[in-house]
Image (cartoon, rainbow, N blue to C red):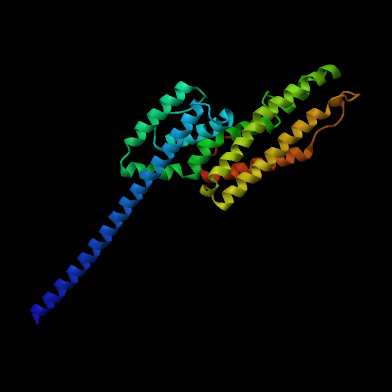
Amino acid sequence: MKNSRKIAAGAAVLTVAFSLMGCTSKESINKTTKQEEAQKEIKIELTFLQNECDRLINKDVDIEKTFQSYKNDFNLLSTSVNSTAKVNKMNNDELEISINNLGKDVDKLNGEEALKAYTKYTSPKTIYKVTMMKNMHSVIEATRGWDDGKDLGISFFYDHLHSSQEDINRDIKPTVNDITNGPVYKLHIIKDELQKHRDAFSKEQLEELETAMKGFDYSLDTQLKTIRSYKNIVNNPYTSNNYDYEEEEKYNGARTYLTDFESNLGVAKPEY
């Protein structure tokens, strides 16, 4: 009986041992599979960037539109794999050198590093910080109503307090162009990036960011309408009340949504 008890106990121990070995084996296989998948996905992204780089260098695409998207895609992958390679401007030599350096850094990744990099690459925090945050804060500065030269609507107001109608009319078009080609264009880039990466964000994050952008959209649109409205007004436009309280309300609401979004994401900056 004692021997049978020992045999039964031994069998139970072996069963548990084999079970644990099975679990460990499965975990190891799953981890290896994830690492291999991560390496594969990063290689796919690198290949895409290499093809886009060639198209930019050969001028086979709309340079301005493609470059802005390429720059964000490149810097996102570069940041994720901890590469020092970066793209800042449309320059063929810079494009070629940076893509070659990024390729070398990607080739050096082992499975564990690749998995960590791909997790970072698909993180909403990394995506927003690398591809949208700088432009978003530039848009904030362009719409916050400070007389510091960055809000062109306010600057136009103060610069023309004592100007003639002729001077006002002369400066309307270049100011409108600066707003259109500056903050309006940057907001458009942000929208494109959000559309490209929207699957990485939660429903709540998307709502906060999209609501914020609508508020900044309204502020910029109001700036443009207000500046254009100053053309050929008989009386000096600055003696009448052209202040748009709804613009201020929309802007404040946008700032609140964006602050909540950035705080929850862990990228909030001090008051700007």
Q: Answer left or right for 166 relative to 198.
A: right
| Residue 23 in the image, given as x and y percentages of width and height | 27, 61
Q: Answer left or right for 230 relative to 88.
A: right
Picture quadrant where residue 173 is located: top right
Q: Please report the residue visible at 36 percent of the width from the left and 42 percent of the height from the top.
A: 114
Q: Nearer the viewer, residue 152 or 144?
A: 152
Picture quadrant where residue 24 is located: bottom left
| Residue 137 in the image, given as x and y percentages of width and height | 60, 33
Q: Please report the residue visible at 48 percent of the width from the left and 33 percent of the height from the top.
A: 52
Q: Please report the residue visible at 73 percent of the width from the left and 26 percent of the height from the top.
A: 176
Quadrant location of the N terminus in the rendered image: bottom left
| Residue 90 in the image, given as x and y percentages of width and height | 52, 24
Q: Is residue 146 visible?
A: no
Q: Nearer the viewer, residue 154 or 55?
A: 55
Q: Is residue 1 above or below residue 57?
A: below
Q: Answer left or right for 216 relative to 78.
A: right
Q: Is residue 103 above or below residue 92?
A: below
| Residue 216 in the image, given as x and y percentages of width and height | 68, 38
Q: Is residue 259 above or below residue 33?
A: above
Q: Residue most toward the right?
A: 234
Q: Is residue 93 visible?
A: yes
